[in-house]
Image: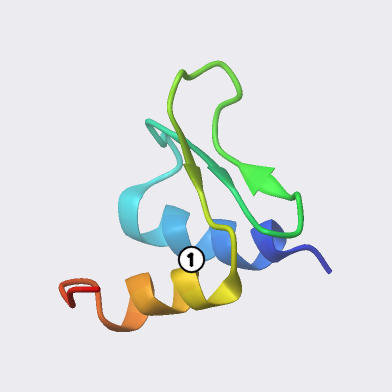
């Protein structure tokens, strides 16, 4: 199972299906419009986990 197939429904339930960015995950999967210039890339599961559980925490 690709990460994007799990994450996409969660993100879309929060921000809607009309995403302004493309999201790429560490396993090569992605979601969002392919025609946008901006891509949010998660290079590891830890990066996504930190964003979800401690979004305001510093480095």
Badge count: 1
The C terminus sits in image quarter: bottom left
Seen from this angle, which residue lies furthest right? 1
The quadrant in which residue 3 appears is: bottom right
> Is residue 10 shown left or right of residue 29?
left
> Is residue 48 shown left or right of residue 26?
left
Between 41 and 23, the one nearer to me in the picture: 41
Measuring from the top left, give residue 22's x and y in whole percent.
52, 35
Residue occupying image coordinates x 23% and y 72%:
55
Between 24 and 32, the one nearer to me in the picture: 24
Q: Name the residue under label 1.
A: 10
Image position of 28 with respect to 52: above or below: above
Measuring from the top left, give residue 42's x and y in whole percent.
53, 57
> Is residue 1 shown left or right of residue 41?
right
The way the protein has been coloured in the rendering is rainbow
Residue occupying image coordinates x 34% and y 60%:
14
Residue occupying image coordinates x 46% and y 18%:
37
Measuring from the top left, give residue 54's x and y in whole percent.
26, 81
Between 15 and 50, the one nearer to me in the picture: 50
Under circle 1, the secondary element is helix
Image position of 8 with respect to 10: above or below: above
| Badge 1: residue crowd in 10 Å (few <14, some 14–19, many ≥20) | few
Between 47 and 52, the one nearer to me in the picture: 47
The N terminus sits in image quarter: bottom right
Measuring from the top left, give residue 29's x and y in whole percent.
73, 50
Residue occupying image coordinates x 38% and y 47%:
16
Seen from this angle, which residue lies furthest front? 59
């Amino acid at each position: 199972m690709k990460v994007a197939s799990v994450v996409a429904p969660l993100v879309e339930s929060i921000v809607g299906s009309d995403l302004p960015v493309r999201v790429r995950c560490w396993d090569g999967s992605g979601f969002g419009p392919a025609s946008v210039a901006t891509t949010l890339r998660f290079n590891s599961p830890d990066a996504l986990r930190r964003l979800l559980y401690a979004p305001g925490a510093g480095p």
